[in-house]
Image (cartoon, helix red, strand yellow):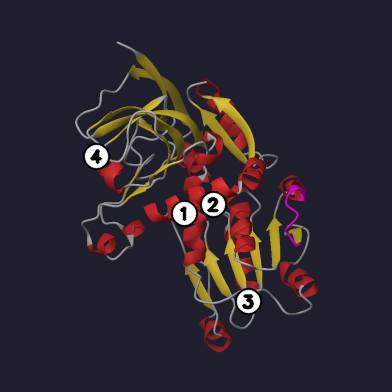
Amino acid sequence: MKKIKCLRWVSNNNMIIDERVMPKIKKNEALLKVESCGICGSDIKIIKFGNKRVQTGQITGHEIAGQFVQVNGSKQFKPGDRVSIGADIPCNNCDNCKEGKGVFCNANLAIGHELEGGFSQYMVLNRHTLDHGPVTKINDLEYDLACMGEPLACCINGFEKVSFRKYDSVLIMGCGPIGLMLAFLAKTRGIEKIYMTDVSDARLKLLKDFEFITQSVNTKKVNLKEWVKTKTHNNGVDLIFTANNSINSHHEALSVLRPQSVVNFFGGLPANSLNVPINTNQLHYQECVLTGSHGSTPNQHSLAVELISKNKTFFKKIVSKTFALNEFKHAFESASNSNNLKVIIKPNE
């Protein structure tokens, strides 16, 4: 029997390359040859700290692109179809799914968490995922770009949560792949002034390739509140995204609120983080709005793939390095290095 390689999470700071028998598909299932699987910040957190949704021995990875090599009974897909795969799988039965709130699905199933992920040469997609999940045909789009459909879909979800007004300026706290995707969406939505912050000079230097960024700064070296005042001539910013996992950015975001500012707490914090104090009088009298976003829907994933297809030049700039599956240690080290943006594992190379 043919053997394939996969990457399994065993315990904190312990991932292994494993061999398993090539999966066999059942009726109404499909076998995907994984060509590219991006490393997400949550994948790095799983390696280090685990996740209550990830069992020992699970194959992680949820930013996936590949080609179907076997399809049994699906009316939507056939062998040879090239696809991008997202993470969150709506059950379509609970009230949240019926109301279009699939990211709050009661079943709470996601590829790379409860379901096997893309750090494997091949993976099986069941009928429900094929029929209702974020599975989008990509035509001739490069796999390394198509696998970014999932994180871009999450960014689209973030913008949809704040889409109730027009913005002239945005402050994005974090210059990693997510921060740059949020900046890209801000540009496409006509936001003229795009400010970005980070705590790494190396990461900030990468912004030179993205000419639409208005200004950027290292928040370890300046007082953000004073910097924003100076750069905006005391006008402040309309919209703020915290695109990182540091609690400091949440404190800083609240410190630069101006009347009618909107904040999206995009990046999740570690489970042991302290609560962030909020002055509700400030929200009341200045009419500020605080919100958050997490995950994405299949429709948002389809929109993400369409946007990537139309803006390949931008997304090519985000890809820093690619690695074979057996180079996963170097891959995760590179993904954790602020000198790099998106790092991708290619399981079949």
Tell me the magenta residue range: 208-214
Mark found first going from the N terminus, 4 or 2: 4
At a point 59% along the width and 59% down the height, the residue shown is: 185
Where in the figure is residue 235, as x and y percent of width and height?
73, 79
Q: Is residue 112 left or right of residue 237?
A: left
Q: Is residue 258 above or below residue 276?
A: below
Residue at the disc numbered 3: 257
How far separated are the C-alphas under marks 1 and 2? 6 Å
Q: CA distance from mark 4 to mark 3?
A: 47 Å
User: Nearer the N terminus, badge 2 or badge 3?
Assistant: 3
Residue closer to the observer: 140 or 282: 140
> Eyeballing the image, is 5 above or below 32?
above
Quarter of the rendering containing residue 341: top right
Instruction: In the rendered view, tell whether residue 334 sits above or below residue 198.
Output: above
Describe residue 42's horizontal placement relative to residue 89 as left or right: right
Label 1: element kind = helix
As for residue 213 lying within the magenta part, the answer is: yes
Instruction: Give the residue type that dot 3 points to.
Output: Leu
Where is residue 251? Give x, y as percent. Answer: 60, 67
Q: Which residue is mark 1?
A: 303
Labels 1 & 2 near each other (Cβ < 8 A): yes
Q: Amino acid at mark 1?
A: Leu
Spot occupied by residue 232 in the image (x, y as percentages of width and height): 76, 74
